[in-house]
Image (tube, rainbow, N blue to C red):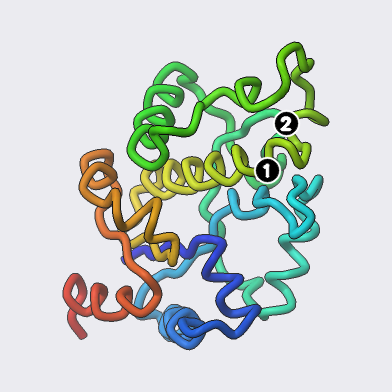
Amino acid sequence: MKITLDWNCVIEVEEDRPQANYVTELIRLHRLGRFEVALLAASASENTKSKRFPGNANVFKKRILALGWQDLPLVPMPGIIGLSYLDFCYYVGDGEKFKRDRDAIWKAIAPKVLRKPKDHLPEGTQMSNNAIQSEKLSKWRNTWCDVISAYSHIHEGRDVFVTNNTRDFQKNASALAELGMKHISTPAEALSTIEQIQPV
């Protein structure tokens, strides 16, 4: 059984939020060999508190190290210029299939959010790494990270996606299931979901 923790699970523990204990219990069971718990490489591209792109993977690495989670495996992400890091991604061989799969997930998660970053910038803005990583595109990057996180999870054939982002994931579970996202749970739900799928 392969379980994926999204970025808000990290924040849940960092800030000692209500579901923090469920996240740490999942990791404890991972270390006991019950199942595999992994983090998303796409999480390294999540916005910083200043609403800007992190710029490198060190921010992610330091935060994971501070939690003592450096032993957790990473779910790799597709390589995307300006938004991914070399050590965290893989080359996409079939670009057209990737775009179709990504667009289908985008439609399921955020049908009202325009997919092209240039559509969120003032007309005539030159697309560059600086533009795509700017504060102006922070909301677009939030959606992009959700989509790429889902894509990475599905692409790797993983079983349970754990997130507190119920607006984008749980509420769209039926559409995402058709795309290969088998089970979506909050940290609290994940433990009972796992018992149903993989009884002790």
* Residue sitting at the far front: 122
> On the picture, is 128 further left or further right than 197?
right
Residue 70 % position (x, y): 66, 71
- In which quadrant of the rendered view does residue 141 lie? top right
Up the image or down, 194 lies above or below 52; here it is below
What kind of residue is marked 1?
Ser
Query: Gap in Å between the C-alphas at discs 1 and 2?
Result: 9 Å
> On the picture, is 87 further left or further right than 79?
right
**Residue 132, label in figure:** 2
Residue 104 % position (x, y): 35, 30
* Residue sitting at the far top: 124
Looking at the rendered image, the quarter that the N terminus falls into is bottom left
> On the picture, is 172 further left or further right than 136?
left
Q: Camera-side residue: 53 or 71?
A: 53
What kind of residue is marked 2?
Ile
- In which quadrant of the rendered view does residue 176 lie? top left
Q: Camera-side residue: 36 or 46?
A: 46
Labels 1, 2: front one: 1
Up the image or down, 129 lies above or below 146; here it is above
Circle 2 crowding by C-alpha within 10 Å: few under 14, some 14–19, many from 20 = many
Circle 1 crowding by C-alpha within 10 Å: few under 14, some 14–19, many from 20 = many
The residue that label 1 is drawn on is 138
Residue visible at 53% across and 42% down in the picture: 143
Residue visible at 29% across and 49% down in the picture: 172
Residue visible at 55% across and 39% down in the picture: 144
Secondary-structure class at tag 2: helix
Looking at the rendered image, the quarter that the C terminus falls into is bottom left
Residue 34 % position (x, y): 35, 80
